[in-house]
Image: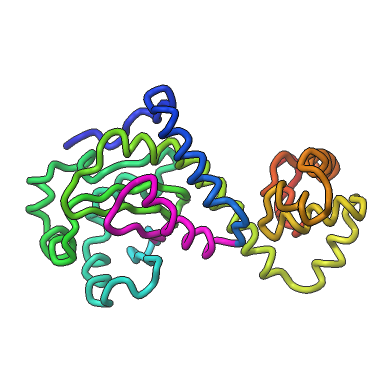
Amino acid sequence: MLHPFQPAASASRLSSRELRKVLDTLHALGDACAGSDDLASRGIECLPGLIGSDLTTLVVCDVDSGHRLVKPEGLLPREMSEVFDRYFRQHPLVRAHGRNPHAVTARLADLVSQSEFHRQPLYNEYYRPIRIEHAMAMPIHVDQRFLVSFVFNRERRAFSDRERDLAELLRPHVANLYRYSVALDRMTALPRDVSTQRAALPLTRREREVLDWVAAGKTNRDVAAILGASPRTVEKHLERIYEKLGVETRIAAVMRAAGRGSSRN
């Protein structure tokens, strides 16, 4: 069996053009991201421009139940989803990434040889009928129950070391965006009386406006344009918000304003 974990991608191994593509992709993913569904759709749309794939999906695996949810929904017939779930716990990528806080981007080929994979029921009953030979998973959230990954699939050409490096370089930043998008989901699901709690925060009116727009998924540049200020002024407002709320990141500030999470997150 091949070793499933590769060293972290080094930016020095990538060209300036590739690094620019990584940054452009990250900006496209984060720009005005308004929640986890939005991040999923943006990722499915934007990531193939960086990592060419025949099929790109966001996959949420419930490791406890052995069930997988795929976005976009309705992509596969129900019977094929049932076949995958039948072999869920045997899937090399699920076994390598599930409940593993150190999970990194990996290809099927990093975990099992092609000849061995071709002998498995998972391949013959699932991958071969849908004409997928190569898969690479970029895990963006792992806890004791759920594994969330963007998955790249191809029929013919194997994923190269360089493509894995590009995905791995992007992965921790997409993971941060995922945490932020989940925080936004929770904000929209909060009861109405939370507004009273938020009004009690030790913030000025302008700082509260900045935080509200950040909670709506706006970038510093977006907030600056909306409020008629400079991006640097918005950054200064955020610095004061972090200090007053006792947090260190945008996600933590949003969660703190929602009454969730403790200080110094």
Rendered location of residue 199, percent (x, y): 89, 61
Q: Residue at x 78, y 56 (%)?
A: 226
Q: Is residue 4 left or right of residue 186?
A: left
> Taking 2 as reference, is 146 above or below it?
below
Foreground pick, 115 / 235: 235
Q: Quadrant of residue 163?
A: top left
Span of residues in magenta: 35-61
Residue closest to the eye, 26 or 202: 26
Residue 84, image x, y percentages:
24, 65
Is 189 left or right of 148, judged from the image as shown? right
Residue 108 within the magenta-colored segment of the rendering: no
| Residue 206 against residue 126 in the figure, above or below | above
Residue at the image position 85 percent from the left and 63 percent from the top: 197
- Percent coordinates x, y for residue 56 in the rendering: 34, 57
Q: Quadrant of the C terminus?
A: top right
* Residue drawn at (16%, 51%) of the image: 156
> Is 59 one of the magenta-colored residues?
yes
Identify the image quadrant of the N terminus: top left
- State the residue in front, 124 or 11: 11
Where is 239 relative to 126, above or below? Answer: above
